[in-house]
Image: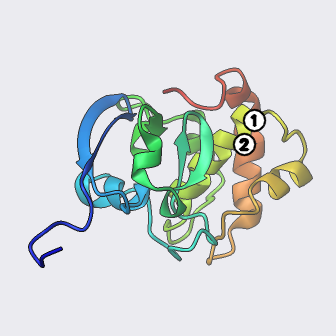
Amino acid sequence: MSDCEPLAALLPIQLTVNGQHHLLQLPPWLTLLDLLRDQLDLVGTRKGCDHGQCGACTVLRNGRRVNACLTLAVMCDGDTLTTIEGVAQGGTLHPLQQAFIRHDAFQCGYCTPGQICSALGLASEGRAHTRDEIREGMSGNLCRCGAYSNITAAVEEALPLMNGQGGCRP
């Protein structure tokens, strides 16, 4: 193999992100996080640890929570993704976003997109009914500011509203 040959061929994928369909040619090693931030310019999804330990990069893949830093973009072929940019509908905030504001569930705001996407996934899973279950279900999302009690209160308030919506509007 010469120095001019590509290491790997680009792979075709199609996916829907926040309601918008994309046809892409991607290298097989590109993470979903890097695709979202660097190629689709959806920078609300945060790069925290880049090792799947902090949850800052949490997005919804077919309604389920995933760490975008640990997911290869080519694995999402045919999938529907929701990032923080796709949660509000037009100028109307999602009930969870409204609850985050009411409960001051963010301080620096860095973890907030991942916290919100994780809570939406938690709601669609239907397994969190108590504060303890919410805390356990959200335990993969770290907040360096320590706003955990406010985050839990916001999720607890919005959970009944989200359960009727399946957690998230696509």
Viewer-proximal residue, 8 or 152? 8
Q: Secondary structure at mark 2?
A: helix
The residue under the point 12% across, 76% down is 2
The residue under the point 50% across, 72% down is 108
The residue under the point 33% across, 55% down is 35
Q: Residues within 10 Å of mark 2 (few under 14, many from 20)?
A: many
Quarter of the rendering occupied by the N terminus: bottom left
Viewer-proximal residue, 153 or 59? 59
For the residues bearing labels 1 and 2, Cβ distance under 8 angstroms = yes
Q: Quadrant of residue 33?
A: bottom left
Q: Amino acid at mark 2?
A: Leu
Residue 5 visible in the current orientation:
yes
Q: Amino acid at mark 1?
A: Glu
Percent x, y of residue 27: 29, 57
User: Most extreme residue toward the front, as rendered?
Assistant: 1
User: Most extreme residue toward the top, as rendered?
Assistant: 164
Query: What's the distance in space between the residues labelled 1 and 2, CA to CA?
Result: 5 Å
Q: Secondary structure at mark 1?
A: helix
Total marks shown come to 2
Query: In this figure, which residue is indicated by the disc labeled 1?
Result: 125
User: Most extreme residue toward the left, as rendered?
Assistant: 4
Percent x, y of residue 55: 60, 64
Query: In this figure, which residue is indicated by the disc labeled 2?
Result: 122
